[in-house]
């Protein structure tokens, strides 16, 4: 499973917990996922679909952000 596939299948909360810097990405896409009560239950792919975003494009941006601040 690629990194992108892994991120797409993670819950929104899991992504935010593991890579807090991705909160900026959710906000840039005008998604209300940060602090949302259903974030622990929705996968990133499901959330992107709800917001009518391309899952592949959104996950690519998240994946890039997840690599920031890593040494």
Image: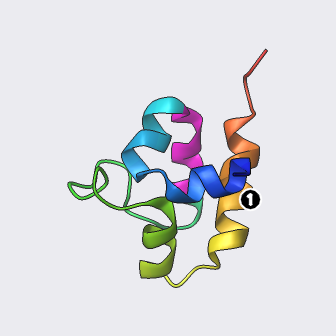
What residue is shown at x 70% (from left), y 71% (from top)?
A: 56
Q: Is residue 71 left or right of residue 41?
A: right
Q: Is residue 41 left or right of residue 1?
A: left
Q: Which residue carries the number 1 mark?
A: 60
Q: Of residues 11 and 36, which is closer to you in this image?
A: 11
Q: Quadrant of residue 13?
A: top left
Q: Residues within 10 Å of mark 1 (few under 14, many from 20)?
A: some
Q: What's the coloring here?
A: rainbow
Q: Of residues 5 and 40, which is closer to you in this image?
A: 5
The part of the chain drawn in magenta is: 19-26
Q: Residue furthest top?
A: 71
What residue is shown at x 49% (from left), y 60% (from top)?
A: 44
What residue is shown at x 74% (from left), y 31% (from top)?
A: 68
Q: Residue furthest bottom?
A: 52
Residue 3: horizontal and vertical position, in percent? 71, 47
Q: Of residues 2 and 36, which is closer to you in this image?
A: 2
Residue 64: horizontal and vertical position, in percent? 76, 46
Residue 24: horizontal and vertical position, in percent? 57, 47
What residue is shown at x 58% (from left), y 79% (from top)?
A: 53
Question: Compared with residue 17, is residue 9 higher up or lower down, i.e. above or below?
Answer: below
In the image, residue 1 lies in the stretch drawn in magenta: no
Quadrant in which the C terminus is drawn: top right
Residue 54: horizontal and vertical position, in percent? 65, 79
Q: Main secondary structure of the magenta part?
A: helix
């Amino acid at each position: 499973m690629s990194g992108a596939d892994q991120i797409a299948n993670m819950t929104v909360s899991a992504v935010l917990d593991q890579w807090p810097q991705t909160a900026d990405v959710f906000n840039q896409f005008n998604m209300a996922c940060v602090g949302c009560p259903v974030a622990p239950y929705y996968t990133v792919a499901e959330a992107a679909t709800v917001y009518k975003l391309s899952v592949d494009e959104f996950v690519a941006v998240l994946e890039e952000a997840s690599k920031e601040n890593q040494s």
